[in-house]
Image: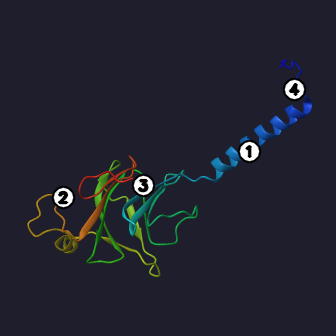
Amino acid sequence: MAKSNKPLSNRTFKVLGILILGMVIYLIINFLASDGIKSYYCLSDNKCVTVWKKENGEVYIIPGKYESNNVPIVSHIKTVSGQFLTLYFSEEFPHKIIVRDQGNYLSDKKKYTLVNNIKEEWQFLEYSDDYKAILYKTDAVKFKDVKASTDYIDLDIYENYATDKNGNKLN
């Protein structure tokens, strides 16, 4: 078979141009519709949180896998990217997440707010010594000395990194 040396027709150039223009428009719309990065951290199916780092610097931590691009109206934590938190899940407190401040990169002041929607299944509680007695073994010395009925997510928002009570990285 002989090769054809025919130049590409105007119609072919138009089709290619429309395809390229369509791809560029799609990429622009996709970029503009995106509002940050969502990371999901799960201990099990019912013990998950979404960490949503928005483009404007706000960070939301939402129970479960939050798929919406709307600001959450469900219970959530509003914080900053440099915050470290531990989120406890205990059989003693079904559908409650106990939040422990572990500091932040920016200052020694707490940089988060718990927002609870009383109609929602999940609620956030601020960690206190009262909860320590319920979450930790009586002879606890180390941070990871929690009771068997307690799980937690140790969260570094800035690094998009989380571990469980055994030190395993969560995906």
Ranked by sequence position, the earlier of labels 1 and 4 is 4
Mark 4 surroundings within 10 Å by alpha-carbon count, few (fewer than 14), some (14 through 19), many (20 or more): few
Q: CA distance from mark 2 to mark 4?
A: 69 Å
Q: Nearer the viewer, mark 3 or mark 4?
A: 4
- As measured in the structure, the alpha-carbon distance from the residue carrying label 3 to the one carrying label 4 is 55 Å
Q: Which residue corresponds to the image point at 39% horizontal and 70% vertical from the top-left?
A: 46
Which residue, given by chain and number where applicable, does mark 3 sit on?
Answer: 80
Residue 8, numbered circle: 4
Q: Separation of disc 2 and disc 1 at Cα?
A: 50 Å
- Describe residue 10's horizontal placement relative to residue 149 as left or right: right
- Report how far apart the C-alphas of labels 3 and 1 lie in the structure: 32 Å
* In this view, the mark in front (2 or 3): 2
Residue at image mark 2? 143
Q: Are marks 3 and 1 in contact (CB under 8 Å)?
A: no
Distance between the Cα atoms at labels 1 and 4? Answer: 25 Å
Q: Reading the chain from its start, which is encountered first: label 3 or label 1? A: 1
Q: Tag 4, which secondary structure? A: loop
Please state the horizontal and vertical placement of residue 94, each as a whole percent of the image: 33, 78
Q: Which residue is mark 1?
A: 25
Per the image, label 3 sits on a secondary structure element best described as: loop
Quadrant in the picture for residue 89 = bottom left
Question: Quick one: label 2 or label 4, which is nearer the N terminus?
Answer: 4
Q: Earlier in the sequence, mark 2 or mark 1?
A: 1
Instruction: Please name the amino acid that badge 2 sits on.
Output: Phe
Residue 150 to residue 24: above or below? below
Q: In this view of the protein, which residue sits in the foreground, 51 or 2?
A: 2
Q: Looking at the image, tell me whether mark 2 or mark 3 is earlier in sequence order.
A: 3
- Residue at the extreme left of the image, as rendered: 139
Per the model, the C-alpha gap separating discs 2 and 3 is 24 Å
Of tags 3 and 1, the one toward the viewer is 1
Query: Label 2: how many residues lie within 10 Å, few (<14), some (14-19) or many (20+)?
Result: few
